[in-house]
Image (cartoon, helix red, strand yellow):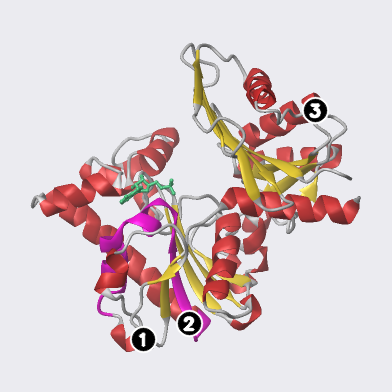
Amino acid sequence: MTGTRVLVLNSGSSSLKYQLLDMGDGGRLAQGLVERIGEETSRLKHTPLRAGASAASRERTGPIPDHEAALKAVADELGLDGLGLDSPELAAIGHRVVHGGQRFTEPTVIDDAVLAEIERLIPVAPLHNPANLTGIRTARALRPDLPQVAVFDTAFHTTMPEAAARYALDTAVADAHRVRRYGFHGTSHAYVSRATARLLGRAPEEVNVIVLHLGNGASASAVRGGRCVDTSMGLTPLEGLVMGTRSGDLDPAVIFHLARVGGMSIDEIDTLLNKRSGLIGLCGDNDMREIRRRVDEGDERARLAFDIYIHRLKKYIGAYYAVLGRVDAVAFTAGVGENAAPVRAAAVAGLESLGLAVDADLNAVRGDGARLISPAGARVAVAVVPTDEELEIATQTYALVRKTN
Ligand code: AMP
């Protein structure tokens, strides 16, 4: 293996996100997004990122019928920057795969058997795994000679003890249908927990971290010495925190009630809980910027949505504090966690007796890198740690292909 470049692909049902990284120096060469694949109004936005290549983004609009055409269009764009997928510099393609079940605990070189197993997991990830598979098949067809690696969103959570991973259900029924807590956003939780240890100047094995990944989807995890011991998402990404459009935790009897009394079908309830609940269901907005603007204007619905979001978040901080016993750091990440100072302040407000506090000035500072926002000398560090799932996927992919070549 001579090349040092890794192409990271994140294939959704109608989108393809990509980043090309050079693992020689960890630098990013290009990134982009194809949206609305299969529609008349598809759009490709490509951004070269290195000196030497044009820095301005390029956009193409017009029909891109399927993922194969999308990847070919991406390859063309990369080719224009001298970064074509036929280059010997390309060492591997790393794919984000949402669900790896219990079988995939590590990044895995993709062969036919691995593809078949990812396919077998579709019933537990019906929205995500089919799209991920399409991306993998397309990339394999384009470069059959190149190692392709699957990096699973669930893998980091496979270290959870059974006490955290099992629901209190009839064991035979749960096992027959593979019903257990898998957790998601694992690549982000892995990256952020390690980056938090680095920020503290300590080895990941030495520190216990609560990671709060607060994006449009949101999840918390308890990480003891670099290993995940609990996380808030479960069989699917619906469990846990209040999210942009997902309800998070609720009494399962709500579903029976809506079916029996509300006359709703299972599919309608599925859509309600995944797409029309959470912040958008509570106040009509799922963008935290807009919600904060409304709160500042005195909007009561937005205020209540914010309060419910924070109440749940605080419960998870407390729960994971108890799970870990000793906490060295709480790390906020993703769109809301990295940008919304009022969310961070409200989430730890009143937790001083647990050693948790936020310094108002540090919290208000905007910045790109990992930074502490707790007062000097605080017992527990509170940090903002930007996540970088693409870098983590590329790092894991490159390490694996170097080891196996
Ligand atoms: P993600 O899923 O990590 O891309 O996060 C997307 C979410 O981050 C958006 O829906 C917003 O709610 C939130 N967000 C992004 N930028 C900001 C900001 N400057 N202030 C508050 N929230 C933000």
Q: Residue furthest right?
A: 405
Amino acid on which the number 2 mark rests in the picture: Val
Examine the image and state in which quarter residue 360 appears: bottom left
SS label for mark 3: loop
- The secondary element bearing badge 1 is classed as loop
Residue at image location 64% in from the left, 61% down from the top: 156
- The residue depicted at 38 percent of the width and 38 percent of the height is 275
Is residue 40 shown left or right of residue 251?
A: right
Q: Is any part of residue 153 visible from this angle?
A: no
| Total marks placed | 3
Which mark sits nearer the N-terminus, 3 or 2? 3
Q: For mark 3, what is the residue?
A: 86
Residue located beneath label 1 in the image: 355
Asked if disc 3 and disc 2 are in contact, CB closer than 8 Å, the reply is no
Q: Which numbered disc, 3 or 2, marks the residue closer to the eye?
A: 3
**Residue 327 - label:** 2
Residue 131 is situated, as x and y percent measured from the top left of the image, at 62, 32
Label 1–label 3 contact, CB within 8 A = no
The quadrant holding residue 332 is bottom left
Residue 331 lies in the magenta-colored region: yes
Q: Please indicate whether residue 381 sits to the left or right of residue 87 in the image.
A: left
Residue 375 position within the rendered picture, expressed as x and y whole percent measured from the top left: 33, 81
Q: Is residue 42 above or below residue 33?
A: above
Q: Amino acid at mark 1?
A: Gly
- Between 206 and 249, the residue placed more toward the observer is 206
Disc 2 from disc 1: Cα separation? 9 Å
Alpha carbon of mark 1 to alpha carbon of mark 3: how far? 54 Å
Span colored in magenta: 324-350
Residue furthest to the left = 298
